[in-house]
Amino acid sequence: MQVRSGLGGKARSWVGRYRVELGLAALALLVGAVVFGLMRSTWPTPLPARPERRVLQTSDTLLSLVSALCTFFLAWCFTRGAGRVDPVSVRHRWRSFLGLWALFAAVFLLWWAGEWPGHYYSDALQSLSVSSQYQVEPWLSTFWGIWAHGIHRATGQFSSLSLFNLFLFSALLADFFSLLLSQGLSRRVGGLFVALVVTSIPLGLLAIYLSHDIINGLLRLSIALILMRAMVRRALTSASGLTPVTLPALVLLTATATLLRGDSMALVLYVPAVLVASRQVRVGVAVALLVGTLGLMQVFRRAVEPRIAPPSPERGNRYALSLILNPLGYLVTNRYYSPDPEGDQAAMDAVIAYSCLRDRYKAEESPCYWDSLNPPISDEKMAELKKRFLRMVRDNPALMLSNRVYTFAGTLGLSPKTPPPFLYMREKWKPEDQYPPHGVRLLAELNLDPARAPQSLARITHWLRDESWPARGGKSLFFPWNGVPALLLALWLVSRWRTLPASAVTAGAVLAPACLVFVAGPASHPSYVADLWMFGHLAVPLAWFEARVLRARAALPPSAGGEGRDAGALDVPPAHLRHNG
Protein backbone atom coordinates (compact mmCIF):
# COMPACT_ATOMS: atom_id res chain seq x y z
CA MET A 1 0.00 0.00 0.00
CA GLN A 2 2.85 2.36 0.77
CA VAL A 3 4.38 1.65 -2.65
CA ARG A 4 1.09 2.37 -4.39
CA SER A 5 0.61 5.51 -2.32
CA GLY A 6 4.12 6.68 -3.22
CA LEU A 7 3.53 6.08 -6.93
CA GLY A 8 0.20 7.86 -6.78
CA GLY A 9 1.77 10.81 -4.99
CA LYS A 10 4.49 11.06 -7.64
CA ALA A 11 1.91 10.91 -10.42
CA ARG A 12 -0.17 13.66 -8.80
CA SER A 13 2.97 15.72 -8.29
CA TRP A 14 3.96 15.25 -11.95
CA VAL A 15 0.47 16.19 -13.15
CA GLY A 16 0.44 19.24 -10.92
CA ARG A 17 3.84 20.34 -12.17
CA TYR A 18 2.97 19.98 -15.85
CA ARG A 19 -0.74 20.76 -15.71
CA VAL A 20 -0.32 23.77 -18.00
CA GLU A 21 1.51 21.73 -20.64
CA LEU A 22 -1.07 18.97 -20.39
CA GLY A 23 -3.86 21.50 -20.83
CA LEU A 24 -2.14 22.97 -23.89
CA ALA A 25 -1.64 19.49 -25.33
CA ALA A 26 -5.35 18.76 -24.82
CA LEU A 27 -6.25 22.05 -26.56
CA ALA A 28 -3.93 21.23 -29.47
CA LEU A 29 -5.45 17.76 -29.83
CA LEU A 30 -8.91 19.28 -29.82
CA VAL A 31 -7.99 21.73 -32.58
CA GLY A 32 -6.41 18.93 -34.59
CA ALA A 33 -9.51 16.77 -34.19
CA VAL A 34 -11.76 19.62 -35.34
CA VAL A 35 -9.60 20.22 -38.42
CA PHE A 36 -9.57 16.50 -39.17
CA GLY A 37 -13.35 16.37 -38.98
CA LEU A 38 -13.77 19.41 -41.18
CA MET A 39 -11.38 17.96 -43.76
CA ARG A 40 -13.32 14.69 -43.73
CA SER A 41 -16.41 16.62 -44.84
CA THR A 42 -14.58 17.71 -48.02
CA TRP A 43 -14.16 14.17 -49.36
CA PRO A 44 -15.67 13.69 -52.81
CA THR A 45 -18.67 11.49 -53.53
CA PRO A 46 -18.56 8.80 -54.68
CA LEU A 47 -15.38 7.91 -52.87
CA PRO A 48 -12.35 7.31 -55.11
CA ALA A 49 -10.33 4.10 -55.22
CA ARG A 50 -8.15 2.96 -52.32
CA PRO A 51 -4.86 4.67 -53.43
CA GLU A 52 -6.66 8.03 -53.76
CA ARG A 53 -8.40 7.50 -50.40
CA ARG A 54 -4.99 7.06 -48.80
CA VAL A 55 -3.94 10.44 -50.18
CA LEU A 56 -7.12 11.96 -48.73
CA GLN A 57 -6.48 10.40 -45.32
CA THR A 58 -2.82 11.40 -45.26
CA SER A 59 -3.47 15.02 -46.27
CA ASP A 60 -6.20 15.26 -43.60
CA THR A 61 -3.78 13.93 -41.00
CA LEU A 62 -1.01 16.32 -42.07
CA LEU A 63 -3.22 19.41 -41.85
CA SER A 64 -4.50 18.24 -38.46
CA LEU A 65 -0.96 17.77 -37.15
CA VAL A 66 0.14 21.16 -38.44
CA SER A 67 -2.88 22.82 -36.82
CA ALA A 68 -2.29 21.02 -33.51
CA LEU A 69 1.44 21.82 -33.40
CA CYS A 70 0.93 25.48 -34.30
CA THR A 71 -1.76 25.74 -31.63
CA PHE A 72 0.51 24.21 -28.98
CA PHE A 73 3.54 26.37 -29.82
CA LEU A 74 1.54 29.61 -29.96
CA ALA A 75 -0.39 28.84 -26.79
CA TRP A 76 2.81 27.90 -24.97
CA CYS A 77 4.44 31.20 -25.91
CA PHE A 78 1.59 33.19 -24.34
CA THR A 79 1.08 31.00 -21.25
CA ARG A 80 4.02 29.05 -19.86
CA GLY A 81 6.47 30.94 -22.05
CA ALA A 82 5.14 34.28 -20.75
CA GLY A 83 6.54 33.45 -17.33
CA ARG A 84 10.06 33.05 -18.64
CA VAL A 85 12.78 35.67 -18.84
CA ASP A 86 12.66 36.37 -22.57
CA PRO A 87 13.42 39.90 -23.78
CA VAL A 88 12.95 38.86 -27.42
CA SER A 89 9.42 37.57 -26.92
CA VAL A 90 6.82 38.91 -29.34
CA ARG A 91 4.52 39.75 -26.44
CA HIS A 92 6.69 42.79 -25.69
CA ARG A 93 6.19 44.13 -29.21
CA TRP A 94 2.92 42.69 -30.42
CA ARG A 95 1.63 46.06 -31.67
CA SER A 96 4.64 46.67 -33.92
CA PHE A 97 4.58 43.03 -35.01
CA LEU A 98 0.94 43.20 -36.08
CA GLY A 99 1.45 46.56 -37.79
CA LEU A 100 4.42 45.32 -39.80
CA TRP A 101 2.70 42.04 -40.59
CA ALA A 102 -0.31 43.91 -41.95
CA LEU A 103 1.97 46.11 -44.07
CA PHE A 104 3.91 43.22 -45.61
CA ALA A 105 0.81 41.07 -46.09
CA ALA A 106 -1.06 43.92 -47.79
CA VAL A 107 1.77 44.45 -50.30
CA PHE A 108 2.09 40.75 -51.09
CA LEU A 109 -1.68 40.45 -51.37
CA LEU A 110 -1.61 43.12 -54.05
CA TRP A 111 0.86 41.01 -55.99
CA TRP A 112 -1.26 37.91 -55.40
CA ALA A 113 -4.45 39.60 -56.61
CA GLY A 114 -2.80 41.25 -59.62
CA GLU A 115 -1.15 37.99 -60.75
CA TRP A 116 -4.13 35.76 -59.94
CA PRO A 117 -4.52 32.80 -60.38
CA GLY A 118 -0.74 32.42 -60.38
CA HIS A 119 1.70 31.19 -62.99
CA TYR A 120 1.01 27.55 -63.87
CA TYR A 121 3.92 26.17 -65.76
CA SER A 122 6.38 23.35 -65.28
CA ASP A 123 6.20 22.08 -61.67
CA ALA A 124 3.19 24.23 -60.74
CA LEU A 125 1.05 22.83 -63.55
CA GLN A 126 2.12 19.28 -62.72
CA SER A 127 1.29 19.83 -59.04
CA LEU A 128 -2.15 21.17 -59.95
CA SER A 129 -2.76 18.19 -62.24
CA VAL A 130 -1.87 15.46 -59.73
CA SER A 131 -3.65 17.27 -56.89
CA SER A 132 -6.86 17.42 -58.93
CA GLN A 133 -6.63 13.62 -59.39
CA TYR A 134 -6.11 12.95 -55.64
CA GLN A 135 -2.56 11.79 -56.26
CA VAL A 136 0.98 12.78 -55.33
CA GLU A 137 4.10 12.97 -57.47
CA PRO A 138 7.33 11.93 -55.68
CA TRP A 139 9.40 13.78 -58.28
CA LEU A 140 8.05 17.05 -56.84
CA SER A 141 8.39 15.74 -53.25
CA THR A 142 5.78 13.46 -51.75
CA PHE A 143 5.44 15.76 -48.75
CA TRP A 144 4.69 18.70 -51.04
CA GLY A 145 2.08 16.64 -52.86
CA ILE A 146 0.29 15.84 -49.59
CA TRP A 147 0.44 19.46 -48.41
CA ALA A 148 -0.64 20.91 -51.75
CA HIS A 149 -3.57 18.53 -52.04
CA GLY A 150 -4.70 19.25 -48.49
CA ILE A 151 -4.70 23.03 -48.97
CA HIS A 152 -6.27 22.68 -52.41
CA ARG A 153 -9.14 20.58 -51.09
CA ALA A 154 -9.59 22.61 -47.89
CA THR A 155 -9.95 25.94 -49.72
CA GLY A 156 -11.10 24.88 -53.17
CA GLN A 157 -8.33 26.97 -54.76
CA PHE A 158 -4.84 25.76 -55.62
CA SER A 159 -3.63 29.37 -55.49
CA SER A 160 -4.31 29.30 -51.73
CA LEU A 161 -0.88 27.67 -51.44
CA SER A 162 0.77 30.96 -52.37
CA LEU A 163 -1.65 32.76 -50.05
CA PHE A 164 -0.36 30.66 -47.15
CA ASN A 165 3.22 31.35 -48.22
CA LEU A 166 2.80 35.11 -48.32
CA PHE A 167 1.17 35.20 -44.87
CA LEU A 168 4.02 33.10 -43.46
CA PHE A 169 6.64 35.26 -45.17
CA SER A 170 4.95 38.40 -43.81
CA ALA A 171 5.06 36.95 -40.29
CA LEU A 172 8.78 36.15 -40.56
CA LEU A 173 9.58 39.63 -41.82
CA ALA A 174 7.41 41.29 -39.17
CA ASP A 175 9.02 39.27 -36.38
CA PHE A 176 12.50 40.13 -37.63
CA PHE A 177 12.03 43.86 -37.99
CA SER A 178 9.86 44.32 -34.88
CA LEU A 179 12.50 42.50 -32.80
CA LEU A 180 15.36 44.63 -34.05
CA LEU A 181 13.42 47.88 -33.73
CA SER A 182 12.20 47.06 -30.23
CA GLN A 183 15.74 46.30 -29.10
CA GLY A 184 17.24 49.55 -30.32
CA LEU A 185 17.83 49.47 -34.08
CA SER A 186 17.62 52.93 -35.61
CA ARG A 187 14.13 53.63 -36.90
CA ARG A 188 15.65 55.23 -39.98
CA VAL A 189 17.69 52.14 -40.80
CA GLY A 190 14.78 49.82 -40.06
CA GLY A 191 12.36 51.96 -42.05
CA LEU A 192 14.72 52.06 -45.02
CA PHE A 193 14.96 48.27 -45.26
CA VAL A 194 11.24 47.79 -44.64
CA ALA A 195 10.72 50.09 -47.63
CA LEU A 196 13.19 48.04 -49.69
CA VAL A 197 11.26 44.86 -48.86
CA VAL A 198 7.84 46.19 -49.78
CA THR A 199 9.14 47.66 -53.05
CA SER A 200 11.12 44.55 -54.05
CA ILE A 201 9.77 42.99 -57.24
CA PRO A 202 11.62 39.64 -56.82
CA LEU A 203 10.30 39.17 -53.28
CA GLY A 204 6.75 39.91 -54.39
CA LEU A 205 6.91 37.43 -57.27
CA LEU A 206 8.72 34.74 -55.28
CA ALA A 207 6.18 35.02 -52.45
CA ILE A 208 3.31 34.13 -54.83
CA TYR A 209 5.21 31.53 -56.88
CA LEU A 210 3.34 28.20 -56.90
CA SER A 211 6.26 25.89 -56.22
CA HIS A 212 7.51 23.68 -53.40
CA ASP A 213 10.76 25.67 -53.62
CA ILE A 214 9.07 28.64 -51.90
CA ILE A 215 7.67 26.86 -48.86
CA ASN A 216 11.04 25.13 -48.60
CA GLY A 217 12.83 28.49 -48.68
CA LEU A 218 10.48 29.90 -46.03
CA LEU A 219 11.13 26.94 -43.73
CA ARG A 220 14.88 27.39 -44.16
CA LEU A 221 14.55 31.10 -43.43
CA SER A 222 12.49 30.21 -40.33
CA ILE A 223 15.32 27.98 -39.10
CA ALA A 224 17.85 30.78 -39.66
CA LEU A 225 15.71 33.30 -37.75
CA ILE A 226 15.13 30.87 -34.86
CA LEU A 227 18.91 30.53 -34.54
CA MET A 228 19.19 34.32 -34.68
CA ARG A 229 16.66 34.72 -31.86
CA ALA A 230 18.60 32.21 -29.76
CA MET A 231 21.84 34.13 -30.27
CA VAL A 232 20.21 37.49 -29.53
CA ARG A 233 18.46 36.10 -26.46
CA ARG A 234 21.75 34.81 -25.12
CA ALA A 235 23.51 38.11 -25.76
CA LEU A 236 20.79 40.02 -23.90
CA THR A 237 20.42 37.69 -20.91
CA SER A 238 23.86 36.06 -20.53
CA ALA A 239 21.96 32.78 -20.19
CA SER A 240 20.97 30.03 -22.58
CA GLY A 241 19.36 31.29 -25.73
CA LEU A 242 17.13 28.22 -26.07
CA THR A 243 13.59 27.83 -24.80
CA PRO A 244 11.84 24.48 -24.20
CA VAL A 245 10.22 24.70 -27.65
CA THR A 246 13.29 25.75 -29.63
CA LEU A 247 14.82 22.33 -30.22
CA PRO A 248 11.51 20.57 -31.11
CA ALA A 249 10.74 23.39 -33.54
CA LEU A 250 14.18 23.04 -35.16
CA VAL A 251 13.73 19.27 -35.53
CA LEU A 252 10.31 19.62 -37.16
CA LEU A 253 11.32 22.45 -39.50
CA THR A 254 14.62 20.84 -40.56
CA ALA A 255 13.03 17.47 -41.26
CA THR A 256 10.17 19.06 -43.21
CA ALA A 257 12.49 21.24 -45.30
CA THR A 258 14.64 18.23 -46.16
CA LEU A 259 11.58 16.21 -47.19
CA LEU A 260 10.65 19.08 -49.52
CA ARG A 261 14.09 19.46 -51.16
CA GLY A 262 17.21 17.37 -50.78
CA ASP A 263 19.56 20.37 -50.64
CA SER A 264 18.07 21.26 -47.24
CA MET A 265 19.97 18.22 -45.92
CA ALA A 266 22.83 20.63 -45.21
CA LEU A 267 20.78 22.02 -42.31
CA VAL A 268 20.49 18.56 -40.73
CA LEU A 269 24.21 18.80 -39.99
CA TYR A 270 24.53 22.58 -39.70
CA VAL A 271 21.96 23.14 -36.95
CA PRO A 272 23.43 20.72 -34.36
CA ALA A 273 26.98 21.77 -35.25
CA VAL A 274 26.34 25.49 -34.84
CA LEU A 275 24.46 24.97 -31.58
CA VAL A 276 27.49 23.14 -30.19
CA ALA A 277 29.97 25.68 -31.60
CA SER A 278 28.00 28.57 -30.06
CA ARG A 279 27.83 26.68 -26.73
CA GLN A 280 24.06 26.58 -26.72
CA VAL A 281 23.91 22.79 -26.18
CA ARG A 282 26.23 19.96 -25.24
CA VAL A 283 27.42 17.39 -27.75
CA GLY A 284 25.00 14.78 -26.45
CA VAL A 285 22.01 17.07 -27.02
CA ALA A 286 23.27 17.90 -30.51
CA VAL A 287 23.55 14.20 -31.33
CA ALA A 288 19.99 13.68 -30.06
CA LEU A 289 18.86 16.58 -32.25
CA LEU A 290 20.54 15.00 -35.28
CA VAL A 291 19.11 11.54 -34.57
CA GLY A 292 15.64 12.98 -33.97
CA THR A 293 15.66 14.83 -37.29
CA LEU A 294 16.89 11.80 -39.25
CA GLY A 295 14.45 9.54 -37.42
CA LEU A 296 11.48 11.76 -38.24
CA MET A 297 12.48 11.76 -41.91
CA GLN A 298 12.82 7.97 -41.94
CA VAL A 299 9.39 7.54 -40.37
CA PHE A 300 7.88 9.53 -43.23
CA ARG A 301 9.88 7.80 -45.97
CA ARG A 302 9.35 4.26 -44.71
CA ALA A 303 5.87 4.41 -43.17
CA VAL A 304 4.01 7.18 -45.01
CA GLU A 305 5.48 7.54 -48.49
CA PRO A 306 5.14 3.90 -49.60
CA ARG A 307 1.39 3.98 -48.82
CA ILE A 308 0.56 6.85 -51.19
CA ALA A 309 3.37 7.18 -53.74
CA PRO A 310 3.14 4.97 -56.82
CA PRO A 311 6.03 2.46 -56.77
CA SER A 312 8.76 2.95 -59.33
CA PRO A 313 11.94 0.84 -59.46
CA GLU A 314 13.60 3.51 -61.61
CA ARG A 315 12.91 6.46 -59.30
CA GLY A 316 16.29 6.45 -57.58
CA ASN A 317 18.17 6.15 -60.86
CA ARG A 318 16.14 8.96 -62.42
CA TYR A 319 16.97 11.24 -59.49
CA ALA A 320 20.66 10.43 -59.84
CA LEU A 321 20.49 11.06 -63.58
CA SER A 322 18.85 14.46 -63.06
CA LEU A 323 21.76 15.51 -60.85
CA ILE A 324 24.55 14.53 -63.25
CA LEU A 325 22.82 15.51 -66.48
CA ASN A 326 23.69 19.21 -66.27
CA PRO A 327 27.48 18.82 -65.83
CA LEU A 328 27.47 15.85 -68.21
CA GLY A 329 25.98 17.95 -71.02
CA TYR A 330 28.43 20.76 -70.23
CA LEU A 331 31.38 18.41 -70.55
CA VAL A 332 30.08 17.05 -73.85
CA THR A 333 29.47 20.45 -75.42
CA ASN A 334 32.86 21.77 -74.30
CA ARG A 335 34.93 18.90 -75.76
CA TYR A 336 36.15 17.35 -72.54
CA TYR A 337 39.26 15.20 -72.45
CA SER A 338 38.67 11.44 -72.40
CA PRO A 339 40.90 8.42 -73.08
CA ASP A 340 37.83 6.49 -74.31
CA PRO A 341 35.32 8.87 -76.01
CA GLU A 342 33.58 6.03 -77.88
CA GLY A 343 32.94 4.15 -74.65
CA ASP A 344 31.67 7.33 -72.98
CA GLN A 345 29.25 7.95 -75.84
CA ALA A 346 27.96 4.39 -75.68
CA ALA A 347 27.39 4.66 -71.93
CA MET A 348 25.46 7.93 -72.42
CA ASP A 349 23.43 6.59 -75.33
CA ALA A 350 22.31 3.68 -73.19
CA VAL A 351 20.58 6.13 -70.82
CA ILE A 352 19.96 9.32 -72.78
CA ALA A 353 20.39 10.40 -76.40
CA TYR A 354 23.97 11.59 -76.85
CA SER A 355 22.87 13.76 -79.79
CA CYS A 356 20.56 15.73 -77.48
CA LEU A 357 23.37 16.44 -75.02
CA ARG A 358 25.57 17.55 -77.90
CA ASP A 359 23.04 19.70 -79.79
CA ARG A 360 20.34 20.85 -77.33
CA TYR A 361 22.10 21.19 -74.00
CA LYS A 362 21.23 24.18 -71.79
CA ALA A 363 22.88 24.71 -68.43
CA GLU A 364 19.87 26.67 -67.15
CA GLU A 365 17.45 23.78 -67.73
CA SER A 366 17.55 20.11 -68.70
CA PRO A 367 15.44 19.68 -71.84
CA CYS A 368 17.00 16.32 -72.70
CA TYR A 369 15.70 14.78 -69.48
CA TRP A 370 12.08 15.21 -70.53
CA ASP A 371 12.15 13.89 -74.09
CA SER A 372 15.40 12.04 -74.80
CA LEU A 373 15.70 9.30 -72.19
CA ASN A 374 16.24 5.70 -73.25
CA PRO A 375 14.32 3.62 -70.69
CA PRO A 376 14.52 1.45 -68.80
CA ILE A 377 17.00 3.33 -66.58
CA SER A 378 18.46 0.18 -65.05
CA ASP A 379 20.99 -0.12 -62.25
CA GLU A 380 23.59 -1.53 -64.64
CA LYS A 381 23.27 1.38 -67.09
CA MET A 382 23.48 3.98 -64.32
CA ALA A 383 26.43 2.27 -62.64
CA GLU A 384 28.41 2.42 -65.89
CA LEU A 385 27.40 6.05 -66.53
CA LYS A 386 28.29 7.12 -63.00
CA LYS A 387 31.70 5.45 -63.22
CA ARG A 388 32.50 7.23 -66.46
CA PHE A 389 31.09 10.54 -65.23
CA LEU A 390 33.31 10.47 -62.14
CA ARG A 391 36.32 9.80 -64.35
CA MET A 392 35.33 12.74 -66.59
CA VAL A 393 35.15 15.02 -63.56
CA ARG A 394 38.51 13.81 -62.28
CA ASP A 395 40.13 14.38 -65.69
CA ASN A 396 38.42 17.75 -66.33
CA PRO A 397 38.18 19.60 -62.97
CA ALA A 398 38.31 23.07 -64.54
CA LEU A 399 35.34 22.30 -66.83
CA MET A 400 33.37 20.91 -63.88
CA LEU A 401 34.05 24.00 -61.79
CA SER A 402 33.12 26.21 -64.73
CA ASN A 403 29.81 24.38 -65.06
CA ARG A 404 29.00 24.82 -61.38
CA VAL A 405 29.83 28.53 -61.42
CA TYR A 406 27.85 29.13 -64.61
CA THR A 407 24.79 27.21 -63.36
CA PHE A 408 24.80 28.88 -59.95
CA ALA A 409 25.25 32.30 -61.55
CA GLY A 410 22.05 31.63 -63.45
CA THR A 411 20.34 30.83 -60.15
CA LEU A 412 21.34 34.34 -59.03
CA GLY A 413 19.73 35.83 -62.14
CA LEU A 414 22.93 36.49 -64.09
CA SER A 415 22.34 34.23 -67.09
CA PRO A 416 20.30 35.55 -70.05
CA LYS A 417 18.72 32.10 -70.41
CA THR A 418 17.60 31.67 -66.79
CA PRO A 419 13.89 30.72 -66.64
CA PRO A 420 12.02 33.31 -64.57
CA PRO A 421 9.66 32.23 -61.75
CA PHE A 422 6.68 33.45 -63.80
CA LEU A 423 5.30 33.27 -67.32
CA TYR A 424 6.84 36.19 -69.18
CA MET A 425 4.27 38.26 -71.10
CA ARG A 426 1.59 35.78 -70.04
CA GLU A 427 -1.33 37.97 -71.06
CA LYS A 428 -0.10 38.47 -74.63
CA TRP A 429 -0.22 34.77 -75.51
CA LYS A 430 -3.07 32.33 -75.93
CA PRO A 431 -3.25 29.45 -73.44
CA GLU A 432 -2.55 27.01 -76.29
CA ASP A 433 0.81 28.74 -76.85
CA GLN A 434 1.83 28.46 -73.18
CA TYR A 435 0.50 25.14 -71.91
CA PRO A 436 0.29 21.56 -73.18
CA PRO A 437 -3.21 20.39 -74.25
CA HIS A 438 -4.02 18.73 -70.92
CA GLY A 439 -2.96 21.91 -69.09
CA VAL A 440 -5.24 24.06 -71.24
CA ARG A 441 -8.18 21.76 -70.51
CA LEU A 442 -7.45 21.63 -66.77
CA LEU A 443 -7.15 25.42 -66.37
CA ALA A 444 -10.38 25.91 -68.34
CA GLU A 445 -12.24 23.34 -66.21
CA LEU A 446 -11.13 25.05 -63.00
CA ASN A 447 -11.88 28.51 -64.42
CA LEU A 448 -8.35 29.73 -63.74
CA ASP A 449 -8.44 32.64 -66.17
CA PRO A 450 -6.06 35.60 -65.52
CA ALA A 451 -8.68 37.90 -67.01
CA ARG A 452 -10.67 37.49 -63.79
CA ALA A 453 -8.00 39.38 -61.82
CA PRO A 454 -8.75 43.07 -61.03
CA GLN A 455 -7.49 44.66 -64.23
CA SER A 456 -6.57 48.07 -62.81
CA LEU A 457 -4.19 46.37 -60.39
CA ALA A 458 -3.14 43.67 -62.87
CA ARG A 459 -1.86 46.22 -65.38
CA ILE A 460 0.57 47.55 -62.77
CA THR A 461 1.83 44.16 -61.56
CA HIS A 462 2.14 42.85 -65.13
CA TRP A 463 4.26 45.85 -66.15
CA LEU A 464 6.50 45.57 -63.08
CA ARG A 465 6.84 41.84 -63.58
CA ASP A 466 7.85 41.93 -67.24
CA GLU A 467 10.00 45.05 -67.10
CA SER A 468 11.99 43.71 -64.16
CA TRP A 469 13.30 40.69 -66.09
CA PRO A 470 16.26 41.84 -68.22
CA ALA A 471 16.93 38.55 -69.98
CA ARG A 472 13.63 38.73 -71.86
CA GLY A 473 13.69 42.38 -72.91
CA GLY A 474 12.97 44.34 -69.73
CA LYS A 475 15.40 47.22 -69.41
CA SER A 476 13.94 49.97 -67.27
CA LEU A 477 14.07 47.87 -64.06
CA PHE A 478 17.27 45.90 -64.61
CA PHE A 479 18.70 45.74 -61.09
CA PRO A 480 16.04 43.77 -59.13
CA TRP A 481 16.88 40.26 -60.36
CA ASN A 482 20.47 40.19 -59.16
CA GLY A 483 21.24 37.85 -56.28
CA VAL A 484 24.96 38.60 -56.12
CA PRO A 485 24.61 41.29 -53.39
CA ALA A 486 22.70 38.83 -51.19
CA LEU A 487 25.38 36.17 -51.69
CA LEU A 488 28.24 38.57 -50.97
CA LEU A 489 26.55 39.91 -47.84
CA ALA A 490 25.96 36.39 -46.52
CA LEU A 491 29.58 35.42 -47.19
CA TRP A 492 30.81 38.59 -45.51
CA LEU A 493 28.71 37.95 -42.40
CA VAL A 494 30.00 34.39 -42.09
CA SER A 495 33.56 35.71 -42.33
CA ARG A 496 32.83 38.00 -39.33
CA TRP A 497 31.85 35.14 -37.04
CA ARG A 498 34.14 36.37 -34.26
CA THR A 499 32.79 39.92 -34.09
CA LEU A 500 29.23 39.33 -35.35
CA PRO A 501 28.35 35.80 -34.15
CA ALA A 502 24.56 36.15 -34.34
CA SER A 503 24.71 37.47 -37.90
CA ALA A 504 27.24 34.80 -38.91
CA VAL A 505 25.10 31.97 -37.52
CA THR A 506 22.02 33.29 -39.33
CA ALA A 507 23.86 33.79 -42.62
CA GLY A 508 25.43 30.33 -42.32
CA ALA A 509 21.99 28.73 -42.09
CA VAL A 510 21.13 30.38 -45.42
CA LEU A 511 24.45 29.59 -47.10
CA ALA A 512 24.61 25.91 -46.10
CA PRO A 513 21.79 24.78 -48.46
CA ALA A 514 23.03 27.23 -51.12
CA CYS A 515 26.37 25.39 -51.08
CA LEU A 516 24.60 22.14 -51.96
CA VAL A 517 22.73 23.94 -54.74
CA PHE A 518 26.11 25.12 -56.04
CA VAL A 519 27.54 21.60 -55.94
CA ALA A 520 24.56 19.65 -57.31
CA GLY A 521 21.94 22.07 -58.61
CA PRO A 522 20.44 20.51 -61.77
CA ALA A 523 19.37 23.81 -63.33
CA SER A 524 19.36 27.59 -62.87
CA HIS A 525 16.09 28.43 -61.13
CA PRO A 526 16.12 31.44 -58.75
CA SER A 527 13.61 29.67 -56.53
CA TYR A 528 16.26 27.06 -55.60
CA VAL A 529 17.78 29.66 -53.28
CA ALA A 530 14.64 31.62 -52.43
CA ASP A 531 15.82 31.97 -48.82
CA LEU A 532 19.04 33.62 -50.03
CA TRP A 533 17.06 36.17 -52.08
CA MET A 534 14.95 36.88 -48.98
CA PHE A 535 17.88 37.08 -46.57
CA GLY A 536 19.61 39.63 -48.78
CA HIS A 537 17.12 42.24 -47.53
CA LEU A 538 17.76 41.31 -43.88
CA ALA A 539 21.55 41.00 -43.78
CA VAL A 540 22.47 44.69 -43.44
CA PRO A 541 19.96 45.63 -40.69
CA LEU A 542 20.93 42.47 -38.78
CA ALA A 543 24.65 43.28 -38.96
CA TRP A 544 23.95 46.95 -38.09
CA PHE A 545 21.88 45.90 -35.09
CA GLU A 546 24.50 43.50 -33.76
CA ALA A 547 27.39 45.90 -34.28
CA ARG A 548 25.70 49.05 -32.92
CA VAL A 549 23.30 47.65 -30.32
CA LEU A 550 24.18 44.16 -29.07
CA ARG A 551 27.91 44.79 -28.79
CA ALA A 552 27.35 48.14 -27.12
CA ARG A 553 24.98 46.66 -24.54
CA ALA A 554 27.34 43.74 -23.87
CA ALA A 555 30.10 46.24 -23.08
CA LEU A 556 28.03 48.07 -20.43
CA PRO A 557 29.38 47.63 -16.87
CA PRO A 558 27.14 46.07 -14.21
CA SER A 559 25.02 48.53 -12.26
CA ALA A 560 22.74 48.41 -9.26
CA GLY A 561 19.88 49.59 -11.37
CA GLY A 562 19.72 46.30 -13.18
CA GLU A 563 21.46 47.34 -16.39
CA GLY A 564 24.56 45.82 -17.89
CA ARG A 565 25.54 42.39 -19.03
CA ASP A 566 26.01 40.75 -15.63
CA ALA A 567 23.20 42.34 -13.67
CA GLY A 568 20.62 39.76 -14.74
CA ALA A 569 18.01 39.82 -17.42
CA LEU A 570 14.88 41.88 -17.07
CA ASP A 571 11.74 40.52 -18.66
CA VAL A 572 10.26 43.92 -19.46
CA PRO A 573 9.45 45.66 -22.72
CA PRO A 574 12.64 47.52 -23.74
CA ALA A 575 10.78 50.74 -24.54
CA HIS A 576 13.34 52.84 -22.63
CA LEU A 577 16.16 51.97 -25.01
CA ARG A 578 17.58 54.70 -27.17
CA HIS A 579 17.35 53.73 -30.84
CA ASN A 580 20.93 53.66 -31.99
CA GLY A 581 21.80 54.81 -35.47
Image (cartoon, rainbow, N blue to C red):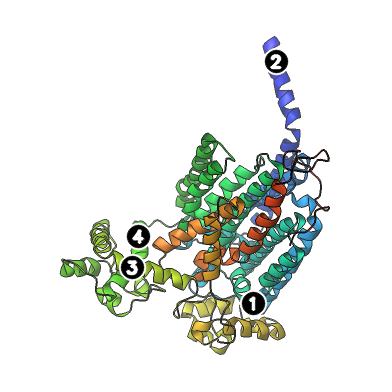
Seen in the picture, residue 77 relative to 434 is either above or below; the reply is above
Q: Which element is circle 2 on?
A: helix
Q: Which residue is mark 1?
A: 116
Where is residue 293? Give x, y as percent.
52, 45
| Pair 3/4: label in front | 3
Where is residue 575? Give x, y as percent.
83, 53
**Extreme-bottom residue of the structure:** 428
Seen in the picture, residue 426 relative to 190 is either above or below; the reply is below
Q: Which residue is mark 2?
A: 6
Residues marked 3 and 1 touching at CB (< 8 Å): no
Disc 4 and disc 2: Cα gap in Å? 59 Å
Instruction: State the residue at coordinates (64%, 55%).
Output: 40
Q: Which element is circle 1 on?
A: loop
| Pair 3/2: label in front | 3
Q: Which residue is mark 3?
A: 327
Instruction: State the residue at coordinates (60%, 53%).
Output: 500
Residues marked 4 and 1 touching at CB (< 8 Å): no
Q: Which residue is mark 4?
A: 320
Task: Give the residue type that dot 1 points to.
Answer: Trp
Q: Residues within 10 Å of mark 2 (few under 14, many from 20)?
A: few
Q: Residues within 10 Å of mark 4 (few under 14, many from 20)?
A: few
Seen in the picture, residue 229 relative to 370 is either above or below; the reply is above
